[in-house]
Image (cartoon, grey):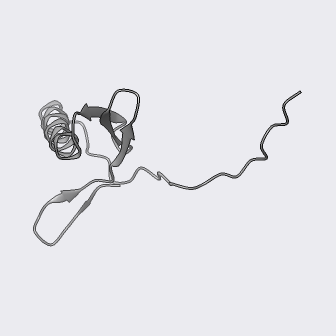
């Protein structure tokens, strides 16, 4: 979700996940449906900020609006463990 805070900044929800196979991090920005990766947690945060700035600048230059809400929900889903046959 993007919203404006008291410092006149936009705030976006970002999901960050560690990738144990690639040994890096992936960030996903649901409001804009954008993803980026980085070798460290700090790098993926910076890459996400850079990507957000580029996307917002492009949207403003093209006259497109900036999303106000993404309705993304993080939740846990419980399923029964499959029985091996």
Query: In x, y percent, where is residue 39?
Result: 22, 34
Query: In x, y percent, where is residue 63?
Result: 18, 35
Position of the N terminus, as image quadrant, is bottom left
Which one is nearer the viewer's eye here, 17 or 70?
17
Which one is nearer the viewer's eye here, 58 or 11?
11
Residue sitting at x 24%, y 36%:
64
Residue sitting at x 10%, y 68%:
7
Q: Where on the picture, by quarter, is residue 60?
A: top left
Residue 11 vertical position relative to residue 19 in the rendered view, above or below: below
Which one is nearer the viewer's eye here, 27 or 18?
18
Query: In x, y percent, where is residue 81?
Result: 77, 43
Q: Where on the picture, by quarter, is residue 26?
A: top left
Position of the C terminus, as image quadrant, is top right
Which one is nearer the viewer's eye here, 31 or 19?
19
Q: Is residue 48 left or right of residue 78?
A: left
Residue 2 vertical position relative to residue 38 in the rendered view, above or below: below
Residue 18 vertical position relative to residue 23 in the rendered view, above or below: below
Query: In x, y percent, where is residue 2?
Result: 29, 55
Q: Is residue 28 left or right of residue 45?
A: right
> How many numbered marks, from 0 up?
0
Q: Residue furthest bottom?
A: 6
Residue sitting at x 32%, y 32%:
23
Residue sitting at x 17%, y 46%:
42
Q: Where on the picture, by quarter, is residue 51?
A: top left
Q: Residue furthest right?
A: 85
Q: Is residue 49 left or right of residue 68?
A: left
């Amino acid at each position: 979700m993007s919203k404006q805070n008291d410092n006149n900044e936009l705030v976006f929800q970002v999901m960050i996940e560690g990738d144990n196979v690639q040994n890096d991090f992936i960030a996903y920005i649901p409001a804009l449906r954008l993803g980026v990766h980085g070798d460290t947690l700090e790098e993926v945060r910076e890459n996400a900020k850079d990507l957000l700035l580029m996307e917002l600048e492009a949207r403003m230059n093209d006259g497109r609006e900036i999303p106000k809400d993404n309705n993304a929900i993080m939740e846990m889903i419980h399923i029964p463990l499959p029985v091996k046959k």
